[in-house]
Image: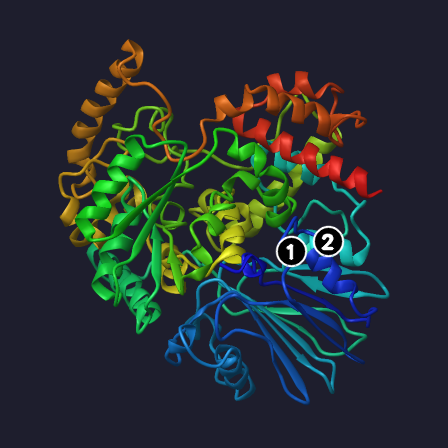
Amino acid sequence: MNSRMAVMMSDFIFSRRPVDKGKLAEAIKGIYHQDWPEVHEFHGEWGSLAVSHNLYNGFQPYETNTSICVVIGGPVLYFRDNTFLENGSDVAGTHSIYRRVRDGKMRWDDDVSGPFAVLMIDKQSSKVICVTDLMSFIPVYTYENTEMVMLATHVDMLAEASGQLEQVDAVSIVDFLLHGVVTFPYTVYTTIRQIAPASEHVMRDSTAGWRHEPYWIPDETYHYSSIQEAAQDLQRHVQHDIQKLTHNVTEVAQFISGGEDSRVIASLLTENADQTPNGFIFLDSMNREGRQAKKAASAYGVEFHLTTRDKLHYLTMLPPSSDLAGGGSQYFHAHTYGFHQRCQLNTYTAVFGGLFSDALLKGARIQKLRGSSRLPFLPQVKQPGHSRRTPVRSRLFSTDVLGALTERRQEHWQYVKQFRPGSADEWFQLWPSSMNMNIPNWHVNRRLFRSYEPFMVNDVVKISAAVPQRWKLNRRLFHKAFKWQLKPTKWLLHSEGRLPYFPWYVNAFVEFVMWAVREAGVRTGRIKGHQGPWAAWQTVMKSPEWQQALTKYASGRYPPVPGMNKTNPHSMVQELEEIQQINLMQTLYRQHQRKGRS
């Protein structure tokens, strides 16, 4: 494998004001620790643009004498075939999008599916159009002042290019520590904002600001007369997208696990792919998750590949993956970092995952009655009266910062409530997708290899918005949609202890039995070691190496976090939940890095 092409990030930075050649390219390369990408620059009276090489074939920048069109990501095109993804012109997809927009035929929510960001520049009139996808799965950020307007698809790149790295937003830092996200539209920089999802953002000339027009909003309007009708639509659309992506494609892989999402993907891939898909799983060692995944792979005819990681992998990867994900994104969701090279994931035409199935289809962001997460055999029931408008409280941070954070979150909740009056709490964490702490998984994957997420395509998003919450709870909608795909593993337990083929009321008994058996096994010592798919965080965080890194990153920074009351980061750790401790470590690393630059 050519290590020079091991990472081929797909991002852009645009400046309305022309900047010196090479400056934007350096900002793009600045988030890399190795394997810097190839970057193309464009300059003119309209401004300056830098675009890194898009690893999805067919989506390189397209330029004419009068226009430039840039596509970030590898969306599925519904208005034509997608055979260019395997073979064909390196601008075929971009050119098709450019022509459809030019001819006035583009319907963004129907014609271009999945994660994308499109930038179009008219070099003669200086008109600029930036289009975001349905959920801003690929977020776009803006910096504006009286002299300059800039856009970028990575918040730290934009901060570097605009000279805003030192303009740290204390409220956003505390938001990230406590919630793992930064409330839309804010970022970790006081002067940078995220632009709206599902919108056309237009700047007509060098003196005008941005005007944005939504092309889709997830209105709380239920379009289905029955759950069965919605399930049939869901199954058909997911199958259709996989068929379009795998048509005439030879090299296909997926992430295999002990869960149900990867089983559905495995079933659909083996039905449609020309060759046997390769299934990859990354673990500390072979455990219950791995054994269930191997059995599932065998049942569906997927070639199983286990790759093990070092016990401190999630500490080692903190610096490079934190920079790759960007400020305000949890680095530890970059599970594939390093394995993209070891497993040569970047050699596949398509690598499929199951991200956002839980969030969009299974009600993962619906607040349930207490106890259902700790006791999985209990039926899921929505918690009445719960609201994310409640004030943010913490003894660790100043009342001024907490008050400002509460105001931001309440503003976002009110914004979402305008179109989701009955499900604002759920969509608070979905709209846009940057409000979901799991999304960095996708942000990193798309920059390392040709990643596809069938549960993030437009039709799935629309179905999620068009069904009542009660259909999502207890996996009812998902189960009805994909029961047939789960049949080959009818008697294979999910790694969490249920049988995905059967409905929730059957699994209430199954999960109770398995929960009791496993609890007894842990208490008696018969079950030892870490059995899950991700890190054994207690092992990582109690290691001397983690404590040394905490001291190193916090040194010379008192208080270590803006808006913090206490000055000792080690005492702060004792008062934070596990995930918040990980967020603290990442935040201290970023401050340590910023201090080094200055």
Quadrant of the rendered image containing residue 39: bottom right
Question: Around disc 2, counting alpha carbons within 10 Å, would you say few (fewer than 14), some (14 to 19), or many (20 or more)?
Answer: many
Label disc, if present, on residue 192 of the rendered structure: 2
Towards the viewer: 565 or 534: 534
Q: Sequence-wise, which precedes: disc 1 or disc 2? A: 1
**Is residue 103 at least partly visible in the picture?**
yes
Disc 1 on helix, strand or loop? loop
Quarter of the image where the C terminus is located: top right
For the image, the number of numbered tags is 2
Q: Position of residue 301 (x, y in %)?
A: 20, 53
Label disc, if present, on residue 265 of the rendered structure: none
Q: Are marks 1 and 2 in contact (CB under 8 Å)?
A: no
The type of residue carrying mark 2 is: Ile
Q: Is residue 84 above or below residue 287?
A: below
Q: Which residue is at 21% across, 37% downward? A: 504
Disc 2 on helix, strand or loop? strand
Q: Position of residue 439 (x, y in %)?
A: 50, 48
Q: Position of residue 297 (x, y in %)?
A: 24, 47
Quadrant of the rendered image containing residue 16: bottom right
Q: Which residue is at 57% across, 41% downward? A: 331
Label disc, if present, on residue 154 of the rendered structure: 1
The type of residue carrying mark 1 is: His
